[in-house]
Amino acid sequence: MNLLDGKIVSQAVKVRLKTYTEERLLQGKKAPHLAAILIGNNGASETYVASKVKSCAEVGFVSTLIRLEESISEQELLFKLNELNEDFDVDGILVQLPLPKHISEQKVIETIHPSKDVDGFHPESVGRMVQGLPAFYPATPYGILLMLEHYNIETKGKHAVVIGRSNIVGRPISIMLNKNEYPGNCTVTVCHSHTHNLKEICLQADIIIAALGRPEFLKGDMVKEGAVIVDVGITRVPDGSKKSGFAIKGDVDFNDVAPKSSYITPVPGGVGPMTIAALMMNTFKACAAKD
Ligand code: GUN
């Protein structure tokens, strides 16, 4: 069993981006600028956005954190987004999800200009990705691809089983893994809550992407010897022994599955850091596209 270490790989990506950014500055060009909007006081969202802002500083990007009250109206938020769309210095815009119930996620996603859509959630970005055109890939699937690439994991002709079909992870990674270039060319099966024989399907998988959001769902008896396991889950479960009062659990029962796997991501320290590295890549690309 080998660890797919998101801390190491994300650090390597960030070192590369820092160098590219320094080169830009030496050429008299601007540094990439990410604007992040955080609404309300969701603990997990606060942590994620803080990591994104910190990573910007690490790679030499400019970041603007815009904190808005939970009670902000949809109209006010859309107005703010339009301001950011028109601000030439801002290269990438992200609105941390989930949103308060009174705000339409779809309207927010569609208001961000596609040229600044570093989350890759806009229908134009998704459409371009599906058609194999240059596009902003959503950060989590993109981070997974960067990790598979780093470890030279063979994907051609492999059977990849994706558990989960969310717009953020399951659906896009299923499309990205079957594109006609490395890392892709997999035969992909997408499983979800209505799938029959999930265990039998998982047992056929060379690569499993667990992205269903159910702590420790994937067990050792559902995995073929030598499979590559990517765990996208990050659920907070109450844990009195931790100072924070919670532990982070993946969708994979690590201790049960790891001995059978050839490669496996830990949680935390696997896909999570890669998501942020991928967001930084997208922000850099958004900036460079304006040169
Ligand atoms: N919430 C959970 N994952 C994500 C993500 O990748 N981007 C944003 N904006 N919000 C999220």
Image (cartoon, rainbow, N blue to C red):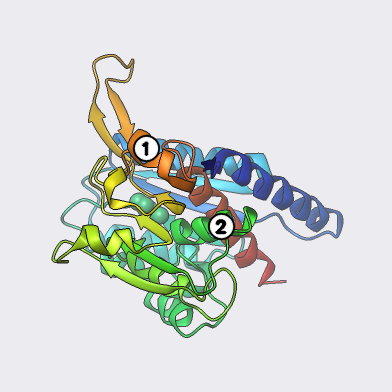
To which residue does mark 1 refer? 254
**In the depicted structure, whether residue 65 falls above or below residue 138:** above
Q: Quadrant of the C terminus?
A: bottom right
Q: Which amino acid type is shown beneath numbered disc 2?
A: Leu
Q: Report x, y in % for residue 85.
A: 48, 67
To which residue does mark 2 refer? 148
User: Which-is-in-front pick, marks 1 and 2?
Assistant: 1
**In the depicted structure, whether residue 190 falls above or below residue 92:** below
In the image shown, does 88 or 20 lie closer to the viewer? Answer: 20
**In the depicted structure, whether residue 222 falls above or below residue 244:** below
Residue under the image location 38 percent in, 57 percent down: 209
Q: Report x, y in % for residue 61.
A: 65, 48
Quarter assignment of residue 165: bottom left
Asked whether, in this view, residue 80 is left or right of residue 155, the answer is left
Q: Secondary structure at mark 2?
A: helix
In the image shown, does 179 or 30 lie closer to the viewer? Answer: 179
Q: Earlier in the sequence, mark 1 or mark 2?
A: 2
